[in-house]
Image: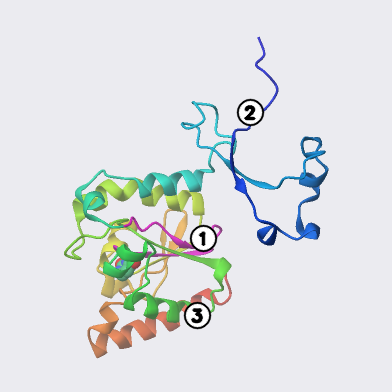
């Protein structure tokens, strides 16, 4: 037997919206003003969709979440390793949902844990400067980490990285970038376990499966010595030259 063809919409009726806070008439949606359900109704209140549980198990009126939103929610509620318990925020991603290039860092630091976004501290300032320098516009790139939660002592946690690994793979499958730029040795090893050490590979593209990988040293390393700062600058210039024709 076929099920009912109607949709069930469940709303909670909120308080009336005071006249001064209502959208001006011209901005109210045509659909709302002309839908029969509103004929003869001159009270304007707020209607908020109700979560399925609160609606007594009825289906979510917004329909199933898209895979990226569902994955983000899964990571944000993950407790599969001890870092998931000690963190303040899981740090999932920032940037375009259709990036050409994804920058892969190692793990959130203190600031990222506080804010819930990758590379928002001092390393992030250096990274953002490099991204601008290589000419990538906002819709072209994204930034994430191998580990989604901060290791309390800021040491890369390999056991946690193994647990977290499926999240990285699923993120990259959904984002489908053409190129990855790894930042530091741990990110390089996570993306290309057979790569030689980062100081031998940084600054040149290499193929990894169906993707191209361009390793860089970690921006925090570039703050540790003049030699590494010089290396960072040279490799970022090389990245810019490689990206310029977008021929990868
Ligand atoms: N270092 C990283 O590897 N990732 C961040 O998000 C911040 C610093």
Q: Residue at x 71, y 59 (%)?
A: 23
Q: Is residue 122 left or right of residue 53?
A: left
Q: Which mark is on residue 244?
A: none
Q: Which residue is mark 3?
A: 132
**x and y, in percent, of residue 54 in the image:** 48, 32
| Marks 2 and 3, the one that precedes in the sequence | 2
| Precedes in sequence: disc 1 or disc 2 | 2
Q: Residue at x 77, y 35 (%)?
A: 37
Which tag is nearer the camera, tag 3 or tag 1? 3
Residue at 50% x, 43% y: name it. 67
Instruction: Name the image quarter holding residue 151.
Output: bottom left
| Residue named by callout 1 | 178
In the image, is residue 176 part of the stretch drawn in magenta?
Answer: no
Pointer 2: what residue?
8
Q: Indicate the position of residue 52 as horizontal and vertical percent values.
A: 50, 32
Measured Cα–Cα span from mark 2 to mark 3: 48 Å
Tell me where the magenta segment starts and ends, as one range. 89-107
Contact check, label 3 and label 1, Cβ < 8 Å: no
Residue placed most toward the observer, 20 or 39: 20
Dot 1, crowdedness within 10 Å: few (<14), some or many (≥20)? some
Say what secondary structure mark 1 lies in.
Answer: loop
Q: Position of residue 64 (x, y in %)?
A: 55, 37
- Nearest-to-viewer mark from 1 and 2: 2
């Amino acid at each position: 037997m076929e099920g009912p063809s109607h949709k069930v919409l469940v709303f909670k009726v909120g308080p009336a919206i005071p006249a001064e806070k209502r959208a001006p008439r011209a901005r109210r949606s045509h659909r709302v003003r002309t839908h029969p359900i509103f004929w003869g109704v001159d009270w304007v209140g707020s209607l908020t969709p109700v979560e399925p549980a609160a609606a007594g198990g009825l289906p979510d009126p917004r329909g199933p979440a898209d895979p990226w939103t569902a994955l983000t929610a899964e990571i944000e509620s993950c407790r599969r390793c001890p870092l998931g318990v000690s963190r303040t925020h899981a740090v999932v991603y920032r940037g375009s949902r259709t990036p050409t290039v994804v920058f892969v860092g190692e793990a959130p630091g203190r600031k990222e844990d506080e804010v819930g976004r990758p590379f928002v501290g001092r390393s992030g300032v250096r990274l953002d400067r490099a991204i601008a320098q290589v000419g990538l516009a906002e819709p072209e790139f994204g930034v994430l980490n191998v580990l989604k939660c901060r290791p309390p002592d800021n040491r890369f946690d390999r056991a946690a990285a193994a647990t977290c690994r499926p999240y990285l793979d699923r993120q990259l499958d959904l984002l489908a970038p053409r190129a990855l730029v790894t930042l530091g040795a741990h990110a390089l090893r996570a993306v290309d376990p057979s790569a030689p050490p980062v100081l031998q590979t940084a600054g040149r593209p290499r193929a990894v499966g169906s993707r191209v990988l361009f390793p860089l040293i970690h921006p925090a390393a570039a703050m540790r010595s003049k030699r590494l700062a010089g290396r960072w600058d040279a490799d970022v210039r090389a990245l810019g030259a490689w990206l310029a024709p977008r021929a990868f």
